[in-house]
Image (cartoon, rainbow, N blue to C red):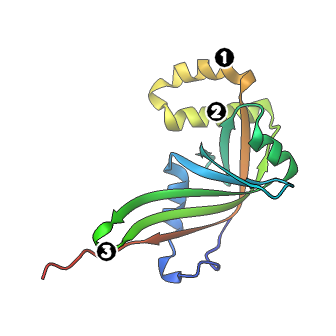
């Protein structure tokens, strides 16, 4: 997975690779964007977990629009937004964001699905891990996992200096 900021027009706003990776790891959700053969784009906010190597995992129902689209086109984009601060008096917004280009994979092995669900429990409900693992087994048959293998990513941010007090 390559950090590629070549296409960012405002090079002065490139987010450090370290901060981009931190957002990938700790953000609670991102927007998965897909496009099927019909050419109609589809974006949906989802929780995700980073595996620590090169992939994100997303959980969903075992049927639905995103899975149908992924059967047609495995190329996806995933957008994560970090800190946002509206600066009304300056008519602008501070922000951090990361865009990932990835290949989506479905029909994963049961072992990989369990691994992904355990990582999700560890991230979002660590204080309830025992209960979460029981819930995972109970609802495993009605859960699908999508793995996004990150090909490249970029990060962008805008930070604004405070107003001077004159």
Q: Is residue 17 left or right of residue 38?
A: left
**Which circle's residue, 1 or 2, is located before the other in the chain?**
2
Question: What mark, if any, has residue 90 been given in the picture?
Answer: 3
Q: Quadrant of the C terminus?
A: bottom left
Residue 55 placement (x, y as % from top left)? 68, 51
The residue under label 1 is 138
* Residue at the image point whose x is 67% and y is 20% from the top: 139
Mark 2, other Cα within 10 Å: few <14 / some 14–19 / many ≥20: many
Q: Are marks 3 and 2 in contact (CB under 8 Å)?
A: no
Mark 1, other Cα within 10 Å: few <14 / some 14–19 / many ≥20: few
Residue 2 against residue 136 in the figure, above or below: below
Residue 80 placement (x, y as % from top left)? 55, 56
The residue under label 2 is 117
Label 1 element class: helix
Label 3 element class: helix
Question: What mark, if any, has residue 39 been given in the picture?
Answer: none
- Point out the residue furthest to the left here: 166
The image quadrant of residue 161 is bottom left
Mark 3, other Cα within 10 Å: few <14 / some 14–19 / many ≥20: few
* Residue at the image point whose x is 78% and y is 33% from the top: 63
Q: In terms of depth relative to the viewer, which is nearer, 25 or 87?
A: 87
Residue 50 against residue 87 in the figure, above or below: above
Q: Quadrant of the N terminus?
A: bottom right
In this figure, what is the number of numbered marks?
3
For marks 3 and 2, give the CA distance. Answer: 43 Å
**Which circle's residue, 3 or 1, is located before the other in the chain?**
3
The image quadrant of residue 39 is bottom right
């Amino acid at each position: 997975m390559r950090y590629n900021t070549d296409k960012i027009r405002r090079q002065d706003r490139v987010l450090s690779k370290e901060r981009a990776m931190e957002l990938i790891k700790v953000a609670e959700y991102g927007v998965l964007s897909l496009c099927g053969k019909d050419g109609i784009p589809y974006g949906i906010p989802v929780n995700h977990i980073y595996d620590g190597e090169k992939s994100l995992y997303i959980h969903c129902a075992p049927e639905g629009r995103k899975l149908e689209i992924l059967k047609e086109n495995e190329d996806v984009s995933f957008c994560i937004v970090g800190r946002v601060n509206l600066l009304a008096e300056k008519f602008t917004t501070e922000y951090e964001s990361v865009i990932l280009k990835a290949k989506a994979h479905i029909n994963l092995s049961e072992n990989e699905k369990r691994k992904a669900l355990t990582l999700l429990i560890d991230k979002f409900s660590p204080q309830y891990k025992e209960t979460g693992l029981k819930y995972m087994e109970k609802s495993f048959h009605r859960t699908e996992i999508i793995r996004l293998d990150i090909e490249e990513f970029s990060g962008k941010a805008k930070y604004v200096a405070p107003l001077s007090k004159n």
